[in-house]
Image: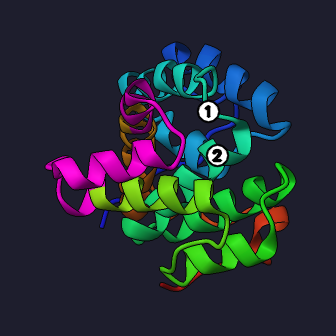
Amino acid sequence: MPKYPIHTIASAPENSKPALERLQQAFGILPNLAAAIANSPKLINSLVGVFQQVHSSSLTEPEIQVVLLTDAVANSSMYAVAFHTALALQQGVGSEETGAIRERRAPANERFAALSNLAKTLIEKRGCLSEQELDSFIAAGFTKEQVLEVVAIVAASTITNYAGTIINPPLEDPFRQYAWQG
């Protein structure tokens, strides 16, 4: 299996540096996964472009983190599960809710459950949602436009989930307590 260096901003390929700077500003640290994805300027820049759109959607940041955590679990991405558990908790998602998602159960919060279910179903059914599944999401208080926003979040998380599984970077200290084995 190939090894991917975990770059600093200084050591990253020149075309990856602006993207890493943006991510470091957003998170307060440069996540190891992003630092390794930077080996491909195309992939890190794609991630940052989608990331900016995802985090400016009509969904709240806790709702976005519920989708990202659900995606990480559905894709069995150990790094992303730990990372998004920490971010979800920081955004006010409760430990009971994050615990449920990590255990592949629906959160008790109805909106979070609808988001988590839609994200999981999108991944498992490769986007082939039934009318009933879409109607159920909208009945939970979401809009048809937000269905498409969840698609964008799933797209962003696919980059990090797949790359994380391939790269398998070490968890940073703040995320180790949320390590997950699936």
In this rendering, the answer to whether 105 lies above or below 150 is below
Q: Quadrant of the N terminus?
A: bottom left
Q: Which residues are magenta?
A: 122-150
> Dot 2: within a 10 Å radius of its alpha carbon, few (fewer than 14), some, or many (20 or more) residues?
many
Q: Which residue is mark 1?
A: 59
Residue at horizontal 65%, vertical 67%? 82
Q: At which x and y percent is residue 9? A: 69, 27
Residue 11 lies in quadrant: top right
Given residues 77 and 145, the one toward you in this image is 145
Give the residue displayed 54% in from the left and 28% down from the top.
54
Kind of residue at disc 1 = Leu
Magenta highlight on residue 145: yes
Q: CA distance from mark 1 to mark 2?
A: 6 Å
Q: Secondary structure at mark 1?
A: loop
x%, y% of residue 170?
63, 66
**Can residue 20 be seen at all in this image of the molecule?**
yes
Q: Is 174 on the left or on the right of 77, as rendered?
A: right
Residue 80 image offset from top left, x and y in percent: 56, 60
Q: Determine which quarter of the picture holds residue 172.
A: bottom right
- The residue lying toward the viewer, choosing from 23 and 41, is 23
Q: Nearer the viewer, residue 121 or 76?
A: 121
Rendered image: mark on residue 63: 2
Residue 45 shown left or right of residue 17 in the figure? left
Look at the magenta stretch and give its main secondary structure.
helix
Q: Are marks 1 and 2 in contact (CB under 8 Å)?
A: yes
* Residue at 75%, 78% in the rendered image: 96
Judged left or right of residue 48, residue 121 is: left
Q: Residue at x 67, y 64 (%)?
A: 109
Amino acid type at image mark 2 = Glu
101 is higher (above) or lower (below) than 146: below
